[in-house]
Each structure stands twice: as structure tokens, then as C-alpha cells.
Image (cartoon, rainbow, N blue to C red):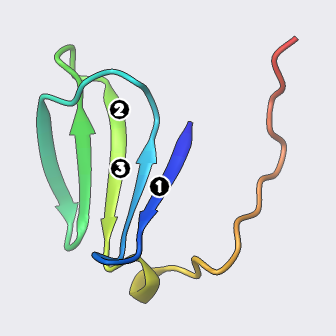
Amino acid sequence: MKLSYDKETDSLYIHLSSREAVEAQEVAQGVVLDFAEDGSLVGIDVQHASQVADISRFLVEHLPLAA
């Protein structure tokens, strides 16, 4: 998983997979889900991110580590 923030557009993108998105669906104002060909979720786009979330810090809890 990877997070990308674009300061110019104030968009936060959460990459859940490296697969290509072929379909997008806005599920709430400013929140777009991207889907792969098979319907699996590959990313989440949060527009105007600094207005809807505290993006000044990032906290990870209980992260499973690969063996």
C-alpha cells in the first residue's frame, strides 16, 4: 500500500494495489473509489483531503509484517 499526496490539488490517493484502475465511482462528495477489471478495489482518492482529514501526521497500528 502506498499513500500519495498532491499539495497542488489537495488530493490524497491511497494505492491499495499496483493493478490498473478501469472504473471509478464517487461514493461520497470528494471520495472516489477506483476498481480493477475484475471489480476489486485498487485505490481511494480523497479530494480536498486537508479539509476532511488531519493529514499533518500518519499513524500506523498493528501493521502485519511479511516473514
Callout 2: 10 Å neighbours few (<14), some, many (20+)? many
Q: Residue 4 carries which label?
A: 1
Residue type at the position of mark 1: Ser
- Tally the marks: 3
Q: Is 15 left, or right, of 44 in this rendering?
A: right
**Label annotation for residue 53:** none
The residue lying toward the viewer, choosing from 61 and 9, is 9
| In the image: residue 38, left or right of residue 5 | left
Q: Which residue, given by chain and number where applicable, does mark 2 sit on?
A: 42
Residue type, mark 2 in image: Val
| Vertical position of residue 60 compared to residue 20: above or below | below
Q: Residue extending furthest front?
A: 8
Q: In which quarter of the image is the C terminus?
A: top right
Q: What element carries label 1?
A: strand
In front: label 1 or label 2? 1
- On residue 44, which mark appears? 3
Quadrant of the image occupied by residue 32? bottom left
Query: Residue, x 45% and y 64% (percent of image)?
Result: 5
Percent position of residue 58, x then y: 70, 66
Contact, CB < 8 Å: mark 2 with mark 3? no
